[in-house]
Image: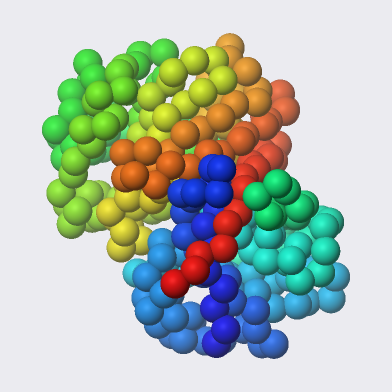
């Protein structure tokens, strides 16, 4: 397989979340895709096959298949743009159909994905207590303006917003324990955030479910966050920035835009850079 290695949501030509992108004539077996994802070692690798006027896409983490991956979609959008030119590309996922738009940028290529529809619901209090205990956090560490909820935009996440930047920077958790807790609720990531202003969030994403301790940029979680903010009636701006990967030394920048219509698709944009081994 010819595996393209790209970093999505890079900032000024640096940082970003690495993803593998593989073009195929026919979709490989699940076993082969999982094996390839493990060998690549990134949090996700996307596999693409041309299908009429669309592209069939499947995403694999080193430990499992995921239904939707934002940063790999941004990466594959750039790959499609490089091969076939600027424009919008239709994508067929396991459970939904979305699109990604590729355009040339000052840094090379950038992409904007339109997520699957969004949904959020209150998280069970007992479950949240167990999660907080694993992270050695207390309810007093969380910002009461942001209720604890499960949120989805193609993949399920738990949203936790802390009161201060230091709490986020000090994130630490027992990998196997949290992986098991995530499996109980089918979580793809636990989205940990600090709200700096009405248009800026700082984020860390625990991704034990996929075999990775932390994700440096998570487009699916960004879209889910936007849907969550819309559901709770957030009074901040409907276009905002997520700064992620800072505490990993891999600064990433995600641009998010959402409409006021509950459940509607969310736009997530970012720059893409090529990874040179």
Q: Position of residue 64 (x, y in %)?
A: 40, 69
Left or right, 213 with reference to 42: left
Q: Position of residue 147 (x, y in %)?
A: 40, 21
Whether residue 261 is situated above or below residue 157 in the rendered picture: above
Nearer to the camera, 199 or 180: 199
Left or right, 103 with reference to 148: right
Whether residue 61 is situated above or below residue 121 in the rendered picture: below
Residue at the (62%, 48%) spot, across then down: 271
Left or right, 202 with reference to 233: left
Q: How many marks?
A: 0
Residue at the (19%, 41%) spot, across then down: 172
Residue at the (59%, 26%) spot, across then down: 240
Q: Which corner quadrant holds the N terminus?
A: bottom right
Q: Position of residue 269 (x, y in %)?
A: 65, 43
Nearer to the camera, 16 or 46: 16
Q: Position of residue 35 (x, y in %)?
A: 40, 82
Left or right, 15 with reference to 82: left
Quarter residue 129 falls in: top left
Q: Can residue 95 be seen in this snapshot?
A: no
Residue at the (57%, 84%) spot, across then down: 2
Nearer to the camera, 91 or 195: 195
Q: Which corner quadrant holds the C terminus?
A: bottom left
Q: Can residue 88 be seen in this snapshot?
A: yes
Whether residue 195 is situated above or below residue 99 in the rendered picture: above
């Amino acid at each position: 397989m010819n595996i393209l290695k790209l970093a999505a949501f890079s900032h000024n030509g640096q940082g970003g979340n690495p993803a593998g992108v593989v073009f195929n004539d026919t979709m490989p077996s699940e076993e082969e895709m999982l094996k390839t994802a493990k060998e690549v070692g990134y949090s996700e690798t996307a596999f693409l096959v041309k299908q009429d006027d669309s592209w069939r896409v499947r995403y694999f983490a080193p430990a499992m298949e995921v239904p939707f991956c934002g940063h790999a979609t941004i990466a594959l959008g750039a790959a499609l743009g490089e091969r076939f030119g600027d424009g919008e590309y239709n994508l067929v996922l396991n459970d939904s159909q979305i699109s990604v738009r590729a355009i040339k940028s000052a840094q090379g290529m950038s992409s904007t994905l339109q997520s699957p529809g969004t949904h959020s619901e209150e998280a069970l209090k007992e479950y949240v207590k167990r999660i907080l205990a694993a992270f050695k956090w207390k309810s007093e560490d969380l910002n009461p303006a942001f209720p604890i909820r499960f949120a989805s935009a193609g993949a399920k996440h738990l949203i936790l917003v802390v009161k201060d930047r230091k709490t986020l920077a000090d994130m630490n958790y027992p990998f196997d324990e949290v992986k098991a807790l995530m499996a109980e609720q089918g979580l793809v990531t636990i989205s940990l955030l600090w709200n700096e202003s009405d248009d800026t969030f700082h984020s860390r994403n625990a991704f034990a479910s996929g075999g990775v301790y932390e994700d440096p940029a998570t487009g699916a979680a960004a879209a889910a966050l936007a849907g969550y903010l819309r559901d709770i009636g957030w009074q901040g701006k409907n276009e905002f920035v997520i700064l992620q990967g800072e505490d990993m030394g891999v600064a990433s920048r995600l641009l998010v835009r959402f409409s006021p219509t509950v459940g509607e698709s969310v736009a997530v944009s970012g720059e893409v850079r090529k990874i040179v081994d």
